[in-house]
Image (spheres, helix red, strand yellow):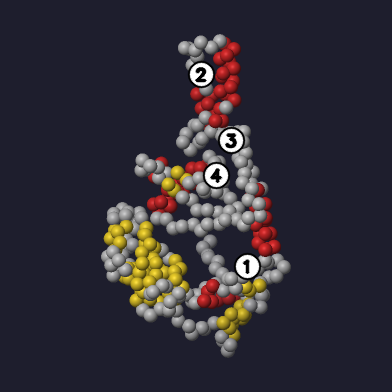
Amino acid sequence: MRPFIVVDKLHIDVILGTDALKAFRAVVDLDENSVTLKDTGEKFSIGSPSVEEMYSTKISSTVRIRPGGQALVVTDVLGEVAEETTVLVEGLVDLDASVRVARSLCTVHDKKVVVEVCNPSTEEMVIKKGTLLAAVSVVPESAFETTVSSPADESEPFSPGEKAPAKHESDWIHATIAASSQTTDASPDAMPELDKVLQAELKIDFSDSKLGDEQKELFSDLLGSFKDMFVETSIKPGRADLLEFSIDTGDSAPIKQRPYRVSKAEGDVMESEIQQYQEVSLIRPSSSPWASPVLIIRKPDGGPASASTIDASTP
C-alpha cells in the first residue's frame, strides 16, 4: 500500500495523474481552464499564471549549538518582501548536512524572519554570521481561507475572526468526551508479577521480634492488605484506590496547547519514557479535547536520559 497525505488546501502546484482524475470523476474544460467534479459539482480553476515568490535568508549573528540541541535564530531576508507577510520557511537544498532547518510558517518583520535550526550531530556546531540558512516562500492569503462543515449545513464559509456555532463545538466536545469515557480502566489485579514478588518479599523475619504469635499474624495480615502500595521497580509504583480525584471544569472550554519541536535525541527519550509507562498501564492513549505537550525534565544531578521524568502537568 502506498502512503498518502490528506490536505485541506494547497498553495503550491501539484501533479495529478489521470487515475486520480478518473477516481474523482473529474471533467477538464480547457476552454474555461477549469476542472469540475461530477459527484459533488465542485469547480476548480487550473492553469493559474501566478508564480510563488521565494527568497533566501542569511543568519544575522553567529550562533553556537550544542550536540543534539536546537535554537531559534534571526535571519535577514535577501530581497524586497512586504512587511507582515506570512512565509513558509524551509532549509536550503545545498545546506550543510549537519544543519537541519525546521519547516515552519513565520511573519516577516523589518525584513527579518525567525528560523529554528537543529544540530543532529554529536559535536558542537557554530553557524557564522552571514551564512545562507533558509529559503522563504510567500504564502498567499487564499491559503488561510477555510470552511466549517456540519451535518445540518454541509459547507459554510466563515472568516478567521468569526466563531463557529457554539452548538456544533459543544456537540463535538461532548462526543469526544463520551468516546474517551468508554475506555475501560486498568484492572487493579493486572500486576501478576508484582504479586509473585510480594509473596516472597512479605515473608517477615520475626526471629528477633518480641511479638506474640497472634500479633505476628495480625501484623502480617495488615502488611499484606497494603501489598499494592509497595514498589516493585521505579516504573511500577504501588497503587491505591482509597481516594479518587477529579477536576470539575464546569462549562469551561478545553485547553489545547500546541506541541513544540524537539531534537531527534530528545524525541527518542520521550517515546521511550511514554512507552514504558503505557506498558504498565500508568497512562493510556486519550481522545480528550484537553491536550498539553509532554515535557521531559532532567533530575538535578544531571543523570542519564533514563533518569528523565514526565512533568506532572501532562494530562
Residue at figure coordinates x 53%, y 26% from the top left: 198
Q: SS at mark 1?
A: loop
Determine whether 302 is above or below 72 in the image.
above
**Labels 4 and 1: the sequence-earlier one:** 1
208 sits to left or right of 67: right
Q: Position of residue 84 (x, y in %)?
A: 45, 74
Q: Badge 3, how many Cα within 10 Å: few under 14, some, many 20+? A: few
Tell which circle, 1 or 3, labels the residue nearer the N-terminal end. Answer: 1
Q: Assign a secondary structure to mark 4.
A: loop
Q: Which residue is mark 1?
A: 163
**Which secondary structure lies at badge 2?**
loop
Q: Is residue 94 visible?
A: no
Query: Counting other residues with Cα less than 10 Å from the Cα at mark 4, is it few (<14), some (14-19), or many (20 or more)?
Result: some
> CA–CA distance between discs 1 and 3?
46 Å
Q: Earlier in the sequence, mark 2 or mark 4?
A: 2
Q: Which amino acid type is shown beneath numbered disc 3?
A: Ala
In front: mark 2 or mark 1? Answer: 1
CA gap between label 4 and label 3 equals 14 Å
* x 62%, y 57%: residue: 253
Instruction: Tell me which amino acid carries mark 1.
Output: Lys
Farthest bottom residue in view: 31
Say which residue label 2 marks. 204
For the residue marked with disc 4, what is the amino acid? Answer: Ile
Residue identifier under label 3? 190
Residue for badge 4: 283
- Whether the residues at callouts 2 and 3 have beta carbons within 8 Å, the answer is no
Q: Quadrant of the rendered structure where residue 254 is?
A: bottom right
Q: Earlier in the sequence, mark 2 or mark 1?
A: 1
Q: Could you tell me residue 31's position as x and y percent? A: 58, 89
